[in-house]
Image (cartoon, rainbow, N blue to C red):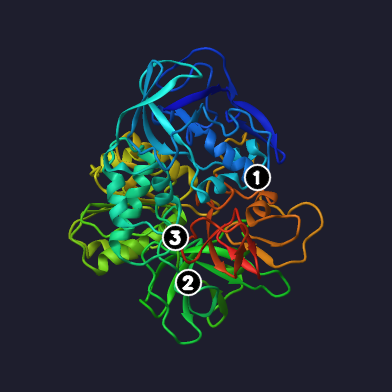
Amino acid sequence: MARLLSVNVGLPRDIPWQGQIVHTGIWKTPVNGPRMVRRLNIDGDGQGDLHGHGGERRAVFVYQIESYRYWQNYLRRNDFVYGQFGENFTVDGLADTDVCIGDRFRIGGALFEVTQPRVTCYRLGIRMDEPEMAALVVKHGRPGFYFRVLEEGQVEAGDDITQVGSGPEQMNVSEIDALLYKPGHPGDQLERALRIPALSVGWRRSFEALLAEARKGSGTTGNAGLGAASGPSPAWRGFRPFRIARKVRESGNVISLWLAPMDGHPVAAALPGQFVVLRLEPTSQPALMRSYSLSGGDGTSSYRVSIKQETHGAASRYIHERLGVGDIVSASAARGSFILRQADTPVVLLSAGIGVTPVLAMLQALATDVSPREIWWLYGARNGREHPFAAEARGLLERLPHAHSHICYSAPDPGDRPGIDFDATGRLNVQDIEKCNVPLNADFYICGPSSLMSDLTAGLTALGVTSDRIHTEMFGATPSVTPGIAALPRRPPHLPTGPSGSGPMVSFARSGLNVRWGPSFKNLLELAEACDLPVRWACRTGVCHTCETGIVAGKVGYHPDPVDGPAEGIVLICCSQPEQDVVLDL
């Protein structure tokens, strides 16, 4: 019979790590005597990051003494103590290959149900003093698992563990862990996993995403259950030369460039909402790289990008003042996941300022198809002089049988006509959405200043719009994800301190930095952190895919190898190194 060897608890604390402060509860120590297990915690225990750990379905983490012995041999160590792996229960028995999701166990006075394997986390590497530990437990099939507490009660070391119920489908912890993290995600296995009621919500959503991808039969690479949707793979890697066929002024501060490929070969038709990266090469200056949403194009013969003149924008100033018809620029293939969904639901296109560009491309696509969908066009500008594409948008809306428009000017000029040029005075906000009686079952596409997007997203959520129907496109750097790291004042991106490297050039397209790779960095994530770029990560070992980043040009290598590789056109910056000059969408 299985037995509880140790009950381990610990409250979150702050520890120094790589020049930062990490808030973590992974340090657990054994307790003597009985201890009360409650719905969310064992008395005296806590989790530092409730997004990745804790909660009703992750109340108690379990690890096995047999895995202790395995890791002691593998890592050639003999310094382990109970709680070494951050577990609440150290047990004899209950192997990951035997215990199934949904199994129920009686321990002491409490009743438990198995809900999911361990969540991969860099903090395990800190606790173990083994940076790759989060990947190793997955690669070796020894993750451990979580209990939820069905009946609260007291437990103590020495209690017998009695199985009192079996989960449906009989899928063990190792199988479920491999189904998410390792390559190969068979549809029949995903369907089995989704028939297990006890499976936690996060894992269920990941398996649903993997199953949806499997049913498409597209043969796409990557892990849809882990990586944020990155959109279709770009049509080509790197840059192609384009000639400026037209330069058109759209408003007082916005111009459009029509770009035709120099080689005469068609460009891949962009999906409405995608963007390209332009490489600009001013004379006697370093190359400038900037991402611009496509505001349209002529099918496969050209792209159109539209650029607002920014007061201190080196790239926009160069484009507005120096580039002309016949000049050559380099452009990437269209890329990105901010894409108009094919569906029958209503569509709401919300934008302000230059944020109009990707949703204008969506409006063009809807008008081309004479879509029968209900379509709302809500846009905010300062005044008529700063309202690009006003006539173009009106013409597109007239072609749609069920279109609605609402234009807001925050500071209209005396000549701007209410009811003709604009409909309301003030900045576009969620109250405008309510006034227009927009249906809340619509798909909402939002692009504009970050404050507008956050306000509209929060407002729509408060109105009951589900998160899967709110789609946003972020200009510039995306928000960082650094779980457990104490917040510090944000610094603008900069070159790393110390001597510059002599390796490949790493260009961060969204941030405008060009940095030489050097031996002081283990991976591209560390380089980005040294530049104070907003980055996203969780495991730091190539498992969780949180760090997925688009690669526009160049080639990387991996060390360590990721457990499951990313999609084409994507790299995992937490475990990759440049093998040649690279351009990252970061």
Give the label on residue 333, or none: 2
Going by the numbered disc 1, the residue's amino acid type is: Leu
For residue 1, above or below residue 585: above
Residue at position x 55%, y 64% in the image: 551
Residue at position x 57%, y 80% in the image: 328
Can you see residue 208?
Answer: yes
> Left or right of 437: which side holds 17?
right
Give the label on residue 199, or none: none
Please identify, in this view, whether the residue under mark 2 or under mark 1 is nearer the observer. Answer: 1
Q: Which residue is mark 3?
A: 222
Can you see residue 447?
Answer: no
**Crowding at label 2, few (<14), some or many (≥20) Cα neighbours within 10 Å?**
many
Residue at position x 50%, y 60% in the image: 565
Going by the numbered disc 3, the residue's amino acid type is: Gly
Rendering coords of residue 568 (x, y %)? 47, 66
Asked if marks 2 and 1 touch (Cβ < 8 Å), the reply is: no
Rendering coords of residue 24 (x, y %)? 59, 31
Q: Secondary structure at mark 1?
A: helix
